[in-house]
Image (spheres, rainbow, N blue to C red):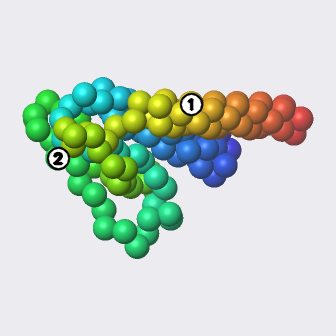
Amino acid sequence: MPLIEDPTAAGLKRVLEFHNKRHDVLTSNIANANTPGYRAFDLVLKKELDAAKPLEPSRSDPRHLSLNAELARIPAKLEQSDAPGRLDGNNVSLEQEFLRMIENRTRYEAGMELLDRWAALNRVARETR
């Protein structure tokens, strides 16, 4: 069975896709740290928000990327931060965003390491048959 068809490898791939998309959301928050009225978002797994209403971010320019199609492939939802905002309405905390990015990167790297080790185990198993 090729690695890509393996259920474990496919699950790890979805984990990596989630962390990759979460990184995009977090970097968007950082990029908009000085945009008046901007509210921070985070990408969370659906099982934590099954009862919540899905949030649709608005696109102010047709050139902006749409996350809707990409999020349909992975079990995740956008969650808007309810943190208090500054006087200009922006609620992005750079410290919080950088901490989330470090956590996200660590989990992404752990997923890559697991996928790499799984692939190595599969190679060894195929060679010993």
Horizontally, residue 114 falls left or right of residue 35, namely: right
- The answer to which image quadrant residue 91 occupies is top left
User: Which sits in the foreground, 53 or 113?
Assistant: 53
User: Which sits in the foreground, 122 or 11?
Assistant: 11
User: Which sits in the foreground, 101 or 59?
Assistant: 101
Residue type beneath disc 1: Ile
Image quarter (top left, top right, bottom left or bottom right) of the C terminus: top right
- Quick one: which residue is furthest to the front in this view? 87
- Quick one: which residue is furthest to the left in this view? 61
Q: Is residue 42 above or below residue 97?
A: below
Q: Which residue occupies 11% across, 38% down?
A: 60
* Residue 20 in sight in this render: no
| Labels 1 and 2: the sequence-earlier one | 2
Q: Is residue 121 above or below residue 1?
A: above
Horizontally, residue 26 falls left or right of residue 28, namely: right
Residue type beneath disc 2: Ser
User: Which sits in the foreground, 61 or 114?
Assistant: 61
- Residue 58 is marked as 2
Q: Which residue occupies 48% across, 44% down?
A: 18
How many marks overall?
2
Horizontally, residue 20 falls left or right of residue 40, namely: right
* Residue 38 position in % (x across, y down): 23, 40
Eye-nearest disc, 1 or 2: 1
Image quarter (top left, top right, bottom left or bottom right) of the N terminus: top right
Q: Is residue 95 above or below residue 81?
A: above
Mark 1 = which residue?
Answer: 102
Q: Which element is circle 2 on?
A: loop
* Residue 49 position in % (x across, y down): 44, 65
Q: Which residue occupies 28% across, 49% down?
A: 68
* Residue 43 position in % (x across, y down): 42, 48
